[in-house]
Amino acid sequence: MTETHSAAPAPSLDAGRRWRRMAGRTLRRPELGAFGATIFVFIVFGITAGDSGMFSVAGISNFLEVSAQLGILATFVALLMIGGEFDLSLGSMIGFSAIIIGIGVVQFGLPIWLTVLIAFGFAVVIGTLNGILVTRTRLPSFIVTLAGYFVLRGLSLTITRLLTGRTQIPYITKNSDEAGFVALFGGKFATGLFSWLGSIGLIPLRADGSLTIQGLPVSIAWWIGLTALATWILVKTRFGNWIYAVGGDAQAARNVGVPVTRVKILLFIGTACAATLFSVIQVMQSGSADVLRGTQKEFEAVIAAVIGGNLLTGGYGSAIGAFFGALIFGTVEQGFFYTGIDTDWFMVFLGVMVLAAVLFNNFVRRKATEAR
């Protein structure tokens, strides 16, 4: 009698399937394109600007600071875009928050910490109003927040000129006894590490023996921390699932019990508070406020989010992608300065990057949908 034996599946085949599945999941990640573009940008500037000081400690600090401030905005813009909405009042909110802080301190003698809390209070109110108007009127968020853009910018100009006679408020932090609070937003961190690097000769010293750079701007720590928080929300919480559901199909999400209105209101509050944080950081660093501060930042934040893989149609994207999008933005902006390229070309680069990112993201999402 002939014995038959069932052949065990070849381990190599199982490993091959696992590898293909893993590769497929990786290719469908929204931040993949931005990650690849980041590597490409660093390689290009490493070749063209490697000996210009761009990748010295001071140079790295410069482009990380630019990336960080934009990245704070882009993180929450990404969450709002995943939820299917836009906030074009972001830039005006930055100027409005700065004026609230400046007027509160200079005109009314309030402590800085209190004016910052008041600014965040206004951000919560304005974000709530944006969310309510969008959800109750069913008007596109583009229209609602565009109106908010003009209202907030006009209020900033009117109130500042009425109370001060000009559009700038200087000396907000001068002679302040709240140095610790100011440093929380406008100071530096990792100062001990930089002192050690200077002692072993990795950071150049001035003629008097002091460090040329004492630490990294604290805005970088805020950027990393908020990106981690947003990623945790999207990946690990029910609220993150709600954001994706609302952006994908709000009516379907509502039918399965997702509180669509609450989600959108909270997302608009998030972008308003991000704009206020951006404003606080700039005020604490410069010690002044300007009604025109934040101009075009709403578009730059959307660009960073789009480059990072967040679709304009909602329901798809990540905070990590926005992180890389902001890093690309800051690196290229500073890279043009270090290489001596006419900065007018930076706008051309942004346009090309946005178009390439949208095409790539649409392709990835289509493949991800076909694979389900």
Image (tube, rainbow, N blue to C red):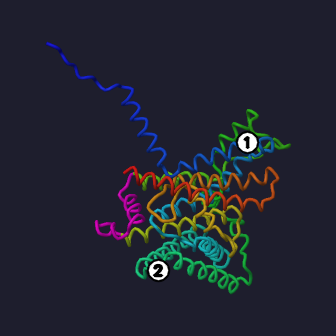
Observer able to see residue 222: no
Local packing at callout 1 (Cα closer than 10 Å; few below 14, some 14-19, many 20+) is some
Q: How crowded is mark 2: few (under 14 residues within 10 Å), some or many (20 or more)?
A: few
Q: Mark 1 points at which residue?
A: 46
Q: Residue 139 got which mark?
A: 2
Q: Could you tell me if residue 93 is visible in this image? A: yes
Question: Is residue 7 shown above or below 214?
Answer: above
The quarter of the rendered structure image containing the N terminus is top left
In depth, the one of 264 and 315 nearer the eye is: 315
Q: What stretch is highlighted in magenta?
A: 236-259
Precedes in sequence: disc 2 or disc 1: 1
For residue 284, the mark is none
Q: Is residue 249 magenta?
A: yes
Q: What element carries label 2?
A: loop
Image quadrant where residue 156 sits: bottom right
Q: Residue at x 53, y 51 (%)?
A: 31
Residue 342: x %, y % from top left:
81, 58
- Residue at x 60%, y 55% (from the top left corner): 325
In the image, residue 67 sits, relative to residue 91, either above or below, namely above
Question: Amino acid type of disc 1?
Answer: Gly
